[in-house]
Image (tube, rainbow, N blue to C red):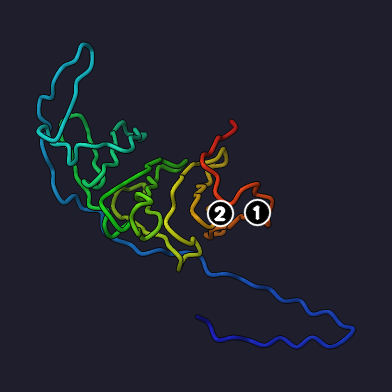
Amino acid sequence: DAEPKLVEVLAGTETRVELVAPRLTGRTVKAVPTRVQPAGRGSRRGEWRMYGVADGLPAASVTAIVQDRQGDLWLGTDGGGLARFDGARFYIYSTEETVGANRVAKVLEDSIGRLWLTGSHFETGSGVGCLDESREHFVSYDRQDGLGTLGWLLAVDSQGRVCIRNDAGLYRLEAARGQFSHFSTQDGLPELLPRAFALRR
């Protein structure tokens, strides 16, 4: 939104021009559980204990699970938003303001403890969401942050960079620069819409 600037380059001369893109900021929403539900007893199946909606799970279908470095389970659900399970309670978070719906498709933790999530690609979501390492705020990133459309695949590479695939190609969060880099077939990506990520360790 900055005012355009003209740079005049005379014939036969060189002029150095530095272009600096603003760091992404996203839209921040305070991370407050909409509901805290004591977990029921569940049911036993051999060595397994099963929890359902009657035991406090916010939706019958769990679409993603990740255990964070504190040992809590984070559950992406189909219609119930995001849930944290500490073994005794379910802490339910709405994701409508973060990814545009309460349908969460992917959840992962990056190298500094942030949780990244994306909504179902069947929704017209806002983009990709991030729950900060202090678990105090959600941040939503979308077109205004250079991300493009709703993210479908998420991964963290060996250098801790978040990689996101959507219908415009592959995006990688460069944390040091605070910006997303975009890669398409013009940059050597063999196909515009990769279907999976495989990370080399």
Q: Position of residue 47 (x, y in %)?
A: 23, 12
Q: Amino acid at mark 2?
A: Gly
Which of the two discs, 2 and 1, labels the residue nearer the N terminus?
2
Q: Amino acid at mark 1?
A: Thr
Q: In the image shown, does 155 or 188 lie closer to the viewer? A: 188
Task: Give neighbour class at mark 1: few <14, some 14-19, many 20+ (Cα, 10 Å).
Answer: few
Number of dots carrying numbers: 2
Secondary element type, mark 1: helix
> Left of 91 or right of it: where is 127?
right
Q: In the image shown, does 189 or 200 lie closer to the viewer? A: 189
* Residue at x 35%, y 52% (from the top left corner): 122
* Residue at x 57%, y 41% (from the top left corner): 159
* Residue at x 48%, y 53% (from the top left corner): 166
User: Are the residues flagged by discs 2 and 1 in contact, CB closer than 8 Å?
Assistant: yes
Instruction: Give the vertical position of 186 relative to 195 (above or below).
Output: below
Residue most toward the right?
12
Q: Where is residue 87, by image quadrant?
A: top left
Quadrant in which the C terminus appears: top right
Please name the residue that numbered disc 1 is placed on: 185
Q: Position of residue 27 (x, y in %)?
A: 36, 64
For marks 2 and 1, give the CA distance. Answer: 8 Å
Secondary element type, mark 2: strand
> Left of 68 or right of it: where is 8?
right
What label does residue 156 carry, if any? none
Residue most toward the top?
46
Q: Where is residue 17, by image quadrant?
A: bottom right
> Left of 44 or right of it: where is 74?
right
Q: Position of residue 112 (x, y in %)?
A: 44, 43
Q: Position of residue 134 (x, y in %)?
A: 33, 48
What label does residue 169 carry, if any? 2
